[in-house]
Image (tube, rainbow, N blue to C red):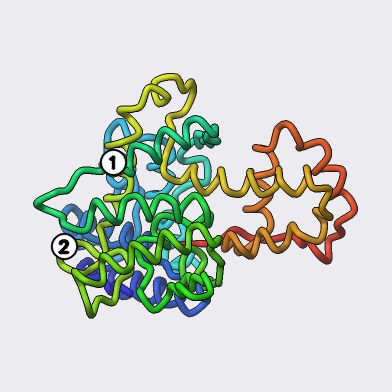
Amino acid sequence: MTDYPFKSLLSTCIKEFVAQKRALGYPYQSSARILYHFDLLVAEKFPGGNTITREMCSAWILSKPGEHPNGLLRRVTPVRQLGKYMKGLGYDVYVIPGHIPDRQVKYEAHIYTTAELKSFFHAIDRCPPSPFSPTRRYVIPVIFRMLYCCGLRSSEARLLKKEDVDLKTGKLFVRESKGWKARVVYMSEDLREVCREYDSIIESMFPNRQVFFPNKDGGCFNKSTIGHWFHEFWDKLPESGAITGNPARVHDFRHGYAVYRLNQWVKEGQDINTLYPYLSEYMGHSNYASTDYYLSLVEDFYPEIEQRLSSVNDDILPEVHHEEE
């Protein structure tokens, strides 16, 4: 858990606000980082400011010209929440209006075809050695298989500790992630065997390692590394150039897992009402609304799934509030 050195005259309120969020069970890591940068802006440009003003918010909103609306939304939301918090304490503050930004661009997930998956995994299996990162060639083929086969978020796989991976049972213990929610998932036997072979190699390089996917120093890879690896291999494939619409991303492996699982249940005639909550739990969602997103991606089967879920009552699928990071 990172505690940022807030410096402006707003620092006390920011620290108390972040502490309150974490006390409620939210990790509030990325949002705390955003507030740290907002605090730096305030300290530099408004050194005497002891409350949030319209001028501060304008400077914050305009600090990244040409920014994608979704990026602006991520930066604005914690500052808006901080303003509401301070207003509730009786401060005379300016709260950023809810219509800023005026739109959020919805990302349409790319569901990989079998041919695309075969091509990508074939490419990463031929990952060349690197003098700068000796573990890289072994980590890449395994970590991407884990993302697709287990539906993990990239951060969840990247931060796995060695003790979190049970190579005998195939159990993965996913520590507190988005929504501060730990969970257990299981690998297939095929993936477990791949991990066993990988582990024996890495164990010879780092006999006492704590991280399952170590970098050259034995620690975790940087959060941007997996995305970099993905594009290093995916962008060179003929299949990548044939995609229309939004480009493929690492996170789409997770989407693909969920859609594949729903498809399989429909084909097998399984009771979706019974299994749906398990999928939500497996994916690490803090509410069913997050899982509902995948229903819209299962185009060929959506009408049938919708019909099967229509009998699920509010006791099972209650009104929920979205999680916070």
Q: Nearer the viewer, residue 35 or 12?
A: 35
Q: Which residue is mark 2?
A: 216
Please identify the quarter of the rendering in which residue 51 is found: bottom left
Amino acid at circle 2 = Lys
Counting from the top left corner in percent of width and height, residue 121 is at: 40, 41
Q: Secondary structure at mark 1?
A: loop
User: In which quadrant of the rendered image does the C terminus lie?
Assistant: bottom left
Q: Nearer the viewer, residue 60 or 214?
A: 214
Q: Would you name the residue on which mark 1 appears?
A: 126
Label 2, secondary structure: give it: loop
Residue at the (55%, 60%) spot, across then down: 188
In the displayed structure image, the side of residue 294 where residue 69 appears, left or right? left
The residue that appears at 27% across and 62% down in the rendered structure is 36
Counting residues from the start of the chain, the first of labels 2 and 1 encountered is 1
Q: Residue at x 28, y 55 (%)?
A: 138
Q: Mark 2 to mark 1: distance in Å?
A: 20 Å
Residue 79, position in %: x, y? Answer: 39, 56
Residue at the left extreme, as displayed: 131
Q: Residues within 10 Å of mark 1 (few under 14, many from 20)?
A: few
Which picture quadrant has residue 211?
Answer: bottom left
Which dot, 2 or 1, sits closer to the camera?
A: 1
* Residue 316 versus residue 166 in the image, above or below: above
- Inspect the image, locate mark 1, and give the three-letter code of the amino acid beneath it: Arg
Residue 281 in sight = yes
The answer, for residue 103, to whether it is visible in the render is no
Q: Is 198 rendered above or below residue 129?
A: below
